[in-house]
Each structure stands twice: as C-alpha cells, then as structure tokens.
Image (cartoon, grey):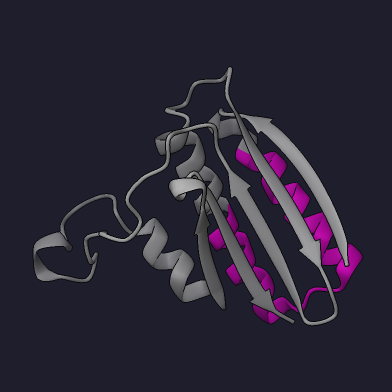
Amino acid sequence: MKTFKIEVPSLMDNLRIVESFIDNAKEKHHIDDDIYGNIMIAVTESVNNAIKHGNHEDKSKNVYLSLTVNEKNISFLIEDEGKGFDFKHLDDPTAPENLEKTGGRGIFLMKHLSDEVHFHKNGAAVELVFYM
C-alpha cells in the first residue's frame, strides 16, 4: 500500500493542482480510463466543496488530499479545516423541489461516481474509494 499527499490553500485556482495530482496518479498507478473520469469529477468536486463550504475560501486554510493505492482499490481522502456538516441529512437533488437549485449536487455526484464514500471528522473529511 502506498500513500501520497498534497495540501493546497483554499483558492479555487488550486483545483488545477488537484487535477495534475490525479493525472499523475493515473500515469503512475495505471488507472483505467473507465474510472479515471469518475475519479476526476468526484475528487475535484470534493475539493471544491472543501474550499467553498469547509474553509469558506479562506486562503489561510488548507485542503489536504491524500491518495492511497493497493492492489484492489484507490482511495482519496479530502480534508478541510472547517467544522464539518450534517452529512446524514442532505436534501435529495433529484426531488422536484430541488431541481431548480444551483447547488446541492456535489455529494450526490460523489456517491454515484465512487464505489464507496465515507465521512470522517464530523464531515470535515471525506474518503472516496474506487475499485480497480
């Protein structure tokens, strides 16, 4: 099992660093194209949420991203410096009353694109697992 880590200040421009981190992981660990797209969308959405909602775009706060690879799966742990959130009671973005809302789809996407999603530290950390 190998683990790789980066940390980025909470600026939206730093999503490019995260994308490069994922691209490097794809090359280094021979991630199949069929899960690469899911990883890119789910992880960048999670980092986006950490920057925007967890750290409130405070550039003095960081988002921590780690990648762990073994022979069966690849997992990403995304952690912010916020207080967390109530991940057990989320609005359903597919409900008719929520279809017009501009937000609220990030976790829905993560759950549908990842094989497993686990919340830690009261929601301030999310682990996304993809089977290889």
Q: Left or right: where does residue 109 sit relative to residue 127?
A: left
Q: Left or right: where does residue 87 sit relative to residue 45?
A: left
Question: Does the magenta segment cover residue 18?
Answer: yes
Residue 24 x %, y %: 83, 56
Q: How many callouts does the rendering have? A: 0
Question: Does the magenta segment cover residue 93?
Answer: no
Residue 97 x %, y %: 9, 63
Q: Residue at x 47, y 33 (%)?
A: 82
Q: Left or right: where does residue 5 sit relative to residue 109?
A: right
68 versus 56 height, above or below: below
Whether residue 114 appears in this view of the structure is: no
Q: Nearer the viewer, residue 79 or 30?
A: 79
1 versus 83 height, above or below: below
Q: Residue at x 52, y 64 (%)?
A: 118
Q: Residue furthest front?
A: 121
Q: Residue furthest left?
A: 97
Residue 19 x %, y %: 69, 50
- Residue 56: quarter of image: top left
Whether residue 16 appears in this view of the structure is: yes
Q: Nearer the viewer, residue 78 or 103?
A: 78
In which quadrant will I find the N terminus?
bottom right
- Residue 94: quarter of image: bottom left
- Residue 74: quarter of image: bottom right
In the image, the segment drawn in magenta is 15-43
Q: Left or right: where does residue 124 sit relative to residue 90?
A: right
Residue 98 x %, y %: 15, 61
Q: Residue at x 50, y 35 (%)?
A: 51
